Amino acid sequence: MTFNARLFCSAVAVLALVSCAKPVTQAPNVSSAELAQERAVHEAAVNASGKGGSTALPADYNRNAYMARLKPMADRISNAAAPYCQSLRTNCRYNFALDKDEAPLNAYADGKNVVISPAMMAFASNDNELALVVAHEMAHNILTHPGKTQQNAMTGMLGGTVLDALLSSQGLNTGGQLGKLGAQQGVLRYSQDFERDADYLGIYIAKTAGYDVSNAPNFWQRMSVNNPQAVYIAQSHPSNPERSVLLRKAIAEIESKQQSGQPLMPALRPKN
Ligand SMILES: [Zn+2]
């Protein structure tokens, strides 16, 4: 059988139109030595705790009271985020809500909303810690990560579908599996980098909003105690020790800018 050059060229032309969306900030790099050192600290915290911490909601959980805590923080974070957001885009209005599912420790951004689970609010030991989570999700929206992740899934799916078609033209039926695999790989392609972007921009936002961000590295240590697997596993998100180191470096960067009177703006990658 002959190689289907026409199909291949058409596919390349389609892929050229849809490229992967990449991270945009210059979040601090974490070396392997720094990671190993921090991992040992997280391991020690996990071992000292005996077992993962509880994420159960307190018995006196009250939705109205939680919203009353979240609303003023949402306003503060939104105001602080405005300069960062408006430097990148025009529509900077986002809704803040409590997750309807009241069990898991979770928070997410979907491009229009910042959603925090009540369990996450209970886990945050104070508003300084909760602000880290809210500002991180706000940063995902500002940096249009939900849309970029969809775009990367589409790019990966297209690439896989092209390979499916090429193999099919050679008489090998893949059942569309490479398209599905491509979509998964597309999502993961820059997923960790998007998280680093959101941690980095998020801590600038929380600091600008007037929160004490100094406990951010320790917050991720507490998250490790809650979920010890995250000390090692890094797939969609960087490992918790890496996040602790990145945030510690970002805090040092912010303090350095404050001391030298520079504006508190995160460093962006040069556009290419
Ligand atoms: Zn995130």
Image (cartoon, helix red, strand yellow):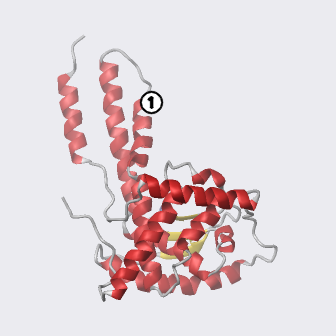
Q: Residue furthest right?
A: 59
The residue sitting at 45% across, 54% down in the picture is 33
Which quadrant of the figure has residue 270?
Answer: bottom left
Which quadrant of the figure has residue 216?
Answer: bottom right
Q: Secondary structure at mark 1?
A: helix
Residue 69 is situated, as x and y percent measured from the top left of the image, at 63, 84
For badge 1, the amino acid type reads Gln
Residue in the foreground of this view, choosing between 182 and 80:
80
In the picture, measured across the screen, residue 29 lies left or right of residue 224, that is left
Q: Residue furthest top?
A: 1
Residue in the foreground of this view, choosing between 202 and 29:
29
The residue sitting at 80% across, 77% down in the picture is 60
In the picture, measured across the screen, residue 260 lies left or right of residue 133, that is left
Above or below — where is 4 with respect to 82? above
Above or below — where is 183 with respect to 98? above
Which quadrant of the figure has residue 217?
Answer: bottom right
Quadrant of image for the C terminus = bottom left
The residue sitting at 67% across, 61% down in the picture is 45
Disc 1: residue Cβ within 8 A of ligand 1's nearest atom: no
The residue sitting at 45% across, 75% down in the picture is 203
| Label 1 sits on residue | 177
Residue 238 is situated, as x and y percent measured from the top left of the image, at 48, 55
Residue 258 is situated, as x and y percent measured from the top left of the image, at 36, 86
Residue in the foreground of this view, choosing between 178 and 171:
178
Q: Is residue 112 visible?
A: no
Tell me the crowding category of disc 1: few under 14, some 14 to 19, or many 20 or more residues within 10 angstroms, Cα based. Answer: some
Quadrant of image for the N terminus = top left
Residue 180 is situated, as x and y percent measured from the top left of the image, at 44, 36
Q: Is residue 214 visible?
A: yes
